Image: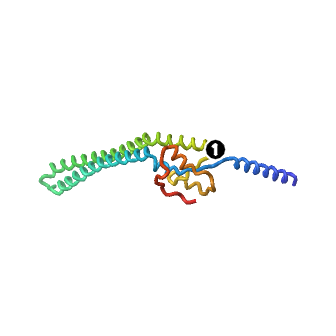
Amino acid sequence: MRKLINVFFVAAGLMFTANMASAQQKLGHINSEEVFANLPEAKAAQTTLETMGKQKQADIDAMIKEYQTKMTAAEAKQKTLSEANKESVGKELQAAGQELQDLEKRITDARTKASQDIGTKQGELFQPIQAKVATAISSVAKEKGLAYVFDIANGQGGNNLVFWEGGDDITAAVKTKLGISAAAAKPATPKK
């Protein structure tokens, strides 16, 4: 019985200490989607990526059109196949088949390369922007004496923060630090 009472007092002491420690920690939250949606550099980077994606897709579409044209021609050539021209038309169809396979491989390679190029460009464009935003968040958190800042943006996995009571929303302060006007549009906010 005495051991049970000692365990109880130790547990109560630990809970009291934990409560005291957590009471001293200040928490804050930010909606990074709102910050990025209003950051001119992020908008310009997104426009650059969209333009690049459209150009890559136009190139791929041109190859697909060429493939379809050659496929139609090969199908038409196959309809002219007869016993009399079997050898010559057969060779032409074989060459057309090889050409179609090569073109199909080029299309697949172009899609892969386009995806890689866009991913690389996205990293090049957004890494400095993310570093700038991270620096602003860190600066505002230090100014406000925050121990932790949670990102409540849906796209950043904000849904894993199920509930928050109070805390400091530093989104506006970070936007100000980055030179974004307070009247800038807000994306949809997550529900508590």
Near-viewer residue (152 or 55): 152
- 31 relative to 135, above or below: below
Number of marks: 1
Residue occupying the point 62% across, 45% down:
144
Residue occupying the point 70% across, 49% down:
23
Residue 21 is situated, as x and y percent measured from the top left of the image, at 72, 47
Residue occupying the point 85% across, 51% down:
3
Near-viewer residue (161 or 33): 33
Residue 166 is situated, as x and y percent measured from the top left of the image, at 63, 55
Residue 45 is situated, as x and y percent measured from the top left of the image, at 41, 44
Amino acid bearing label 1? Gly
Tell me: 136 left or right of 42: right
For mark 1, does the 10 Å Cα neighbourhood hold few (<14), some (14 to 19), or many (20 or more) residues? Answer: few
Q: What kind of element bears circle 1?
A: loop
Tell me: 173 left or right of 77: right
Q: How is the image coloured?
A: rainbow
In the orientation shown, which residue stands out farthest toward the right?
Answer: 2
Tell me: 35 left or right of 19: left
Tell me: 92 left or right of 171: left
Residue occupying the point 53% across, 42% down:
136
Near-viewer residue (80 or 137): 137
Quadrant holding the N terminus: bottom right
In the orientation shown, which residue stands out farthest toward the left?
Answer: 84
- 79 relative to 119, above or below: below
Near-viewer residue (148 or 15): 148
Quadrant holding the C terminus: bottom right
- 163 relative to 138, above or below: below
The residue tagged 1 is: 145
Residue 151 is situated, as x and y percent measured from the top left of the image, at 55, 50
